[in-house]
Image (spheres, rainbow, N blue to C red):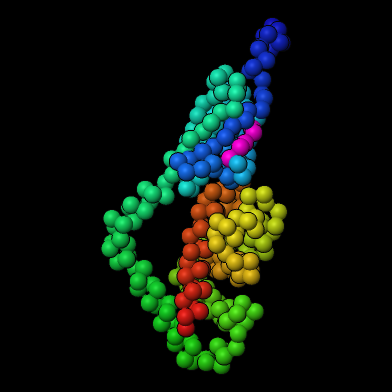
Amino acid sequence: MKYVIFILLPFSMLSQNITGKVYDSETTVKGMKVFNLSNQNGTYTDNEGNFTIKATIGDTLSFHSIFHDKKIIKLTKFHFNDIIVIELSKTVNKLNEVLIQSDTKQKAFNQAKTEATINEQISNDIKSNPHLYGSSSKYGLDIVRVIGLIGKLLKKKNKKNSNVIPISHKSLDSLFSNSSFFNNELLSENLDIPKNYKNLFFDYCETKNLNEELLKNKNEMILLDSLITYSRSFLEIIEASKKK
């Protein structure tokens, strides 16, 4: 009887490809993760915001991006009739408004103190070891020592559980060499890391003791969020070092 019921199921209930296009208020959205929560399959939108994913009527699709509000839709027969269009709301403007309103409080939250401490440490190190800062490195100036010094300070302040395996420079290099999402284009266009600073940025990220668990596909949005944060602080350090 079970086999008879299965045979009688309509073809529309079987897994098939569904295609769509993702927009926000400004343009199409590329690199957006589209995840089928029902069958645990995932994909990404291409440069034009298009995607194709296997799905069945009744499946639930989730659209992830740190720059947009999360959106979840449940598929009906209607969605399989044509290309579905997904419109997302951007979160960037909302975040900026919050930062403007609480700007004074955030500055008071140890940010200025931390920067002053790091600058003082760098200045003292330059005074104590001027010979180490007299020549330029392959990056155009001796930023390597500055990054190294900051890395030591951060490691002292951020001692991690011994059971946590941190992401190494080698792991990041392998990720950006083999992943379709974490690639050189994302590094240069989205994180604003110049090509000749790539390895130095990986060295800097290694000092942050990021959990190796973030390399798993299910955690890639969390990893991207961390890399965006660290790329900003990294570029600030580079600019500050150039002015010295």
- Taking the magenta stretch, the answer to whether it contains residue 50 is yes
Q: Residue at x 47, y 83 (%)?
A: 244
Query: Can residue 53 be seen here?
Result: yes
- Taking the magenta stretch, the answer to whether it contains residue 180 is no
Q: Main secondary structure of the magenta part?
A: strand
Residue 163 in the image: state x and y as whole percent.
Answer: 56, 59
Left or right: 3, with 111 as reference point: right
**Compared with residue 243, is residue 75 higher up or lower down, i.e. above or below?**
above
Q: Residue at x 47, y 80 (%)?
A: 243
Left or right: 196, with 91 as reference point: right
Quick one: 190 or 174, which is closer to the camera? Answer: 190
Residue 101 in the image: state x and y as whole percent.
Answer: 28, 55
**Compared with residue 97, is residue 45 higher up or lower down, i.e. above or below?**
above
Q: Residue at x 32, y 66 (%)?
A: 107
Residue 116's image quarter?
Answer: bottom left
Q: What range is drawn magenta here?
A: 49-53
Residue most extreme to the front: 26
Query: Can residue 165 be seen here?
Result: no
Residue 21 in the image: state x and y as whole percent.
Answer: 57, 35
Residue 234 in the image: state x and y as whole percent.
Answer: 51, 68
Q: Quadrant of the N terminus?
A: top right
Quick one: 210 or 191, which is closer to the camera? Answer: 191
Q: How many marks?
A: 0
Q: Residue at x 47, y 48 (%)?
A: 67
